[in-house]
Amino acid sequence: MDQATTQHAAPASAAAGRNRDIFLRISNHLARVTQIQSALAAVAKEVAQVLPFTHFDICLLDGPDWTVSYEVGIQTRWSRKRARLENSPVRSILCGDLDYMICTNAMEDPRQTFAGATSEPIFNHNLRSRVHVSMNVMGQRVGTLNISHSDQNRFDHDTLALAQPLADLLAPYFHALRAIEKARQDAQARTELQSREEGLRRGASSLTLALEQERQRIGMDLHDQTLADLTRLMRILTDETHPLDRSYLAEAMATSIRDLRQIIEEAMPAQLDLFGLSHALSAHLQKVAQTRAPRACDLRTSLVDNVDFEMDEMLPKDVRTAIYRIGQEAVNNAVNHAGASSIVITLDTDRAGDLVMCVRDDGIGFDTHGRTRRSGLAHMETRARLVRGHLDITSEHGTCVTFRLPLSAQEAPQ
Ligand SMILES: Nc1ncnc2c1ncn2[C@@H]1O[C@H](COP(=O)(O)OP(=O)(O)OP(=O)(O)O)[C@@H](O)[C@H]1O
Ligand SMILES: [Mg+2]
């Protein structure tokens, strides 16, 4: 951008005429753009005609403690994210202590390089000469316009005489554009929140439906199996035409009790309460693996528990149940679909202090973004979200289902 002849060389009246033309052209540009970044690019292009610069930016106040910046040309951390006002090299203007600042060498200027200042871009890009002027709207300070050059001592009061009217011209316009941008961002954030909530609501309602179906299944199992068994036994007991075969009765009762236990176990994982989460997961892993692969060598399973706190004491019951159910479904899927020769569950705590459960198989994997998703995956996802956890499924050389639970988000155990 360092291509212009300076305004010092031109006679004063010619320079004034040229500045007026530039301001007119800037106004014309501004009338046509609605995005801050494109408005700034248009302005910078015109300014470069009369004032050579290395870096050009606008810094706007964003609430009482924060600033946002928009840059042209070199992109630095200034425009990457919001920054705290107290760390801004132009804080004295933003706070109203100064109206402008001219730095002959910002790299050695304590106003720009104080402890905690976001001044890395000054050093990274050798922004030695800097001029900053205030931007005001209806008597309120809204930001600063900042022009920098890598040479020392490039700017003086003549620069100021161009920069301040420019800032006055731009201030209301950029203030309004920023308000529009903020409204757009807020609307987007609201929409995202709504769709997240809607997703959770739908997931929870599908889970409720599944639980209802589960209740119906239990009812049917009790009806078709247990009730039928008991009715048959009752008939034998009350049949006076036949002698009572005690050993047959005992055997039939034992079978019925075993079936009943099976129905209860499926509905309510007693292992979880009796022996704890880790043991319950391990027991499920072994049970499913044995049913599916009767020869032990067909499927290797293991559970590695590296958690350094008492999960069963620290975690509320609903959270433990959710973890168990997620692990259970991930194991079921690995056994049913993966054709794996190994399934490993790991329980761990990571550096951030989150609890992490991984169910990893070495099977055929699947397209995790595809449409093959049925209830199992969707319910895992919902269960994870209902306890404020996060589920991630990757499929590369097998499948890995990772459930992450931020412990800081948990309430005291019930
Ligand atoms: N570990 C895995 N390895 C290979 N494929 C998998 C694995 N986990 C899931 N899948 C694939 O993803 C599909 C969806 O899984 P999901 O658990 O949602 O449904 P499902 O197991 O088929 O039925 P259910 O609703 O009874 O769980 C599966 O049908 C399977 O094709
Ligand atoms: Mg499944």
Image (spheres, rainbow, N blue to C red):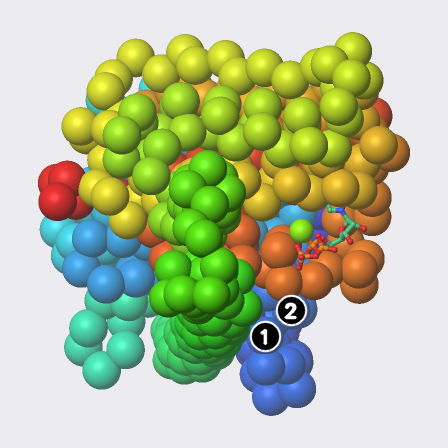
Q: Quadrant of the C terminus?
A: top left
Answer above or below: position of 21 versus 235: below
Answer above or below: position of 229 versus 91: below
Residue 315 percent location from the top left of the image? 23, 35
48 or 358: which is nearer to us? Answer: 358
84 or 38: which is nearer to us? Answer: 84
| Residue position for label 2 | 38
- Visible residue check, residue 184: yes
The residue at 31%/27% (across/down) is 276
The residue at 28%/71% (across/down) is 136
The residue at 28%/67% (across/down) is 142
Label 2 neighbour load within 10 Å: few <14, some 14-19, many 20+: some
Is the Cβ of the residue at disc 1 closer than 8 Å to that at disc 2?
A: yes
Residue 182 percent location from the top left of the image? 41, 73
The residue at 13%/51% (across/down) is 97
205 or 111: which is nearer to us? Answer: 205
Answer above or below: position of 137 versus 97: below
**Is 365 on the left-hand or right-hand side of 361?**
right
Residue 71 percent location from the top left of the image? 55, 52
Secondary structure under badge 1? loop
**Is 297 on the left-hand or right-hand side of 323?**
right
- Visible residue check, residue 350: no
Q: Which mark is residue 35?
A: 1
Amino acid type at circle 1 is Gln
Choose top left, top right, bottom left or bottom right for residue 193.
Answer: bottom left
Secondary structure under badge 2? helix
Choose top left, top right, bottom left or bottom right for residue 114.
Answer: top left
Amino acid type at circle 2 is Ser
Q: Which mark is residue 176?
A: none
Label 1 neighbour load within 10 Å: few <14, some 14-19, many 20+: some
Residue 319 percent location from the top left of the image? 31, 44
